[in-house]
Image: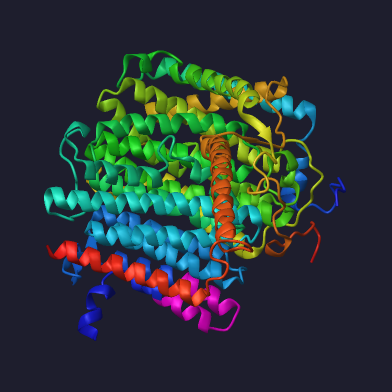
Amino acid sequence: MAELLHPYLQSPVYLFVLGALILPLLPKGNVRALITIIVPILSGFLIWNATPGLHGVTTLAGIEVTLMRVDKLSVIFGLIFSTAAFLAAIYAWHVKDWVQQIATLLYAGTAIGAVFAGDLISLFVYWEGTALASVFLIWARRTRGAYATGMRYLIIQIGSGVILIAGIALHYRATGSIAFDRLTGAGPESWGLGTWFIFIAFGIKCAFPLMHNWLQDSYPAATVTGTVTLSAFTTKMAVYCLARAFPGTEMLVYIGAIMTLFPIFFAEIENDLRRVLAYSLNNQLGFMVVGVGVGTELALNGAAAHAFCHILYKALLFMSVGAVLFRTGTSKASELGGLYRTMPLTMIFCIVGAASISAFPLFSGFVSKSLILDAAAENRYPWVWAVLVFASAGVLSHSGIKIPYFAFFSHDSGKRPKEAPTHMLIAMGLTAFACIFVGVFPSTLYALLPYEVNYQPYTVAHVLAQLQLLVFALLAFALLMRYGFFPAETRTINLDTDWFYRRFAPSVLGLVMAVIRTVWGELARGAGHSVNAAQLLLQRLYGPGGRFEHVQPTGAMVLWLAILLGAALAVNLISLT
Amino acid sequence: MADKSNDNLGPIGKALTKLEQPQIIMKMIYGLAGFCALLLIADFFHLRHGKFESEDLIGFYAFFGFLAFAFIIFATKVLKNIIGRREDYYAPDVIDAEDYPEGELDVKEHGDG
């Protein structure tokens, strides 16, 4: 038994599965919450102490799978995923809903499993696992809207898994390998169909442009605590997969650049602050995708570092807006404002998150984003570089200013909510501390990166350039606000590409259905005539005064049987000859 | 629920409400503008040697930041007219038009136990 289980005990996934199995057996209350906190700590400990190399190699249905590949790239993602699960668990200390607790454990566990998977088959299993576990964090809201949103989310997530397994099958047939490594050494013109499928599957979960809207649709629909958890895993797992399988794919540079750009505008007009953060998440993913696309050591370090910092400050921002929602019942900018009076600590933590995502010096975003920008500049992508600088100003506009300003300042909404509960403040405090710590001591983060780092973020030129960009953008904000040019928040939603499948496709389908219904109706009417005619004929033969009126039913039966037997005999005879 | 009183606030809240006067806000904007000026002047004393020539221009990042922000704000005003819809546009299969379930929350006023 021990021999059989040994490979599975190499990967920290078993801790999460075990936690999820034990949890419902424990008494309701703090003991269960304690499990959700302890499991990620143990997982982090296991990952920190894992020796580099391949572990947990076993054979499943004749295929050799590797459950635990330990190298610097997988370790940094494993560590930050464990940290995120730990912080989210503290934040969710009050949650008594065991469905959410189990879903969170399994979701974090499968995401960690995916980054340590050494082959495509186990990757696929974990890939689908994240989809199945995470949807319960949306359904846990238990409203009609959340149920429908969860279904849309699940269809797209499972769809990505179906494309992935199709890609793996084609890739296996073409190459005979299921190794989860760099899948391609050359540009897309040399890719097989399988490689394309795998790329698209990764792209869906990474929220590539036009495949992105599941993210903005679903994340704001999850519970207060569920959104914090959701923000950490799925998309960064996809970034990891791209960094593992497609580093240096030039197409990603341009895809990433578009990703940094368009969500800025959508985020700026969005009213629900949690959806603003979802758009902002998309924009941050763009920076990482550019890093993967450039593919040099500096750029891949940048992508990993940015994923690390981003998980922390994005969780912090979702936590602070979540705390506002928890206390006021809304996260809509149009309904909020002036909350600094009674939620000052939440406001301070929110500003730390905002400063980190905006990449102010001494905050975490500054030391990670600059790796990617410098890598793009070094590799002579002037336009992409310019887009990234523009997007950096855009980040300030929607995440740096809009989130804290409309929630805590702006006009006085008259709301005087109580400060966030203690456990939420502890979670936010720890996360805020981590954001500042990484910003002040970047070498601690750089030591974890996949390649050796020879980079100094705090040069006079760099600090000055970044401060100019941000402070002048702040000045623009102050002036636009002072002179009434800044648009007010209204209770509206945005159309996005999901309009095509939520409105356009159903209306086209409705039209097609109407056509089919009409044609079918006409056909049925025609068929109805034939049925009527047949009925009339039978009535004329068998009915009163009909030719067979006097024949006994048994007699007619025998007659038909004789005819049938004769026919069978004839067929037999013909086939014999 | 909407009592707009500023009584019984904590120390941070109380200190910040004092700043909410038009003349103090104007002073803060002047302060920000002054800081911007300092940053711009610093460019004369520290020549950047960026990866691109344009980066080395005096005040490149300053103008970029200011103009980018202004562009984003004006562009979104236009965009909102095109793609903005009422909250219940996709109702009822969407969360925007429904309230967050009360049972999941702990809505409390400042000063509540």
Q: Is residue A479 left or right of residue A12?
A: right
Q: Is residue A372 visible?
A: yes
Q: Quadrant of residue A275?
A: top right
Tell me, yes or no, whether the highlighted magenta stretch contains residue B95: no
Looking at the image, residue A53 lies above or below residue A30: above
Between A157 and A227, which is closer to the camera in this rendering? A157
Looking at the image, residue A272 lies above or below residue A51: above
Between A558 and A288, which is closer to the camera in this rendering? A558
Q: Is residue A377 left or right of residue A572?
A: right
Type of colouring: rainbow
Name the image quarter holding the C terminus of chain A. Answer: bottom left
Q: Quadrant of residue B103?
A: bottom right
Q: Is residue A324 left or right of residue A134?
A: right
Q: Is residue A455 visible?
A: no
Dominant secondary-structure state across the stretch colored magenta: helix
Between A87 and A283, which is closer to the camera in this rendering? A283
Tally the numbered discs.
0
Tell me, yes or no, whether the highlighted magenta stretch contains residue A26: yes
Residue displayed at 47% across by 42% down: A363
> Percent position (x, y) of residue A448?
30, 53
Residue displayed at 54% across by 51% down: A316
> Percent position (x, y) of residue A312?
47, 51
What span is in magenta? Answer: A18-38
Q: Is residue A126 left or right of residue B4?
A: left
> Percent position (x, y) of residue A474?
58, 27
Looking at the image, residue A133 lies above or below residue A363: below
Q: Quadrant of residue A1?
A: bottom left
> Percent position (x, y) of residue A137?
54, 60
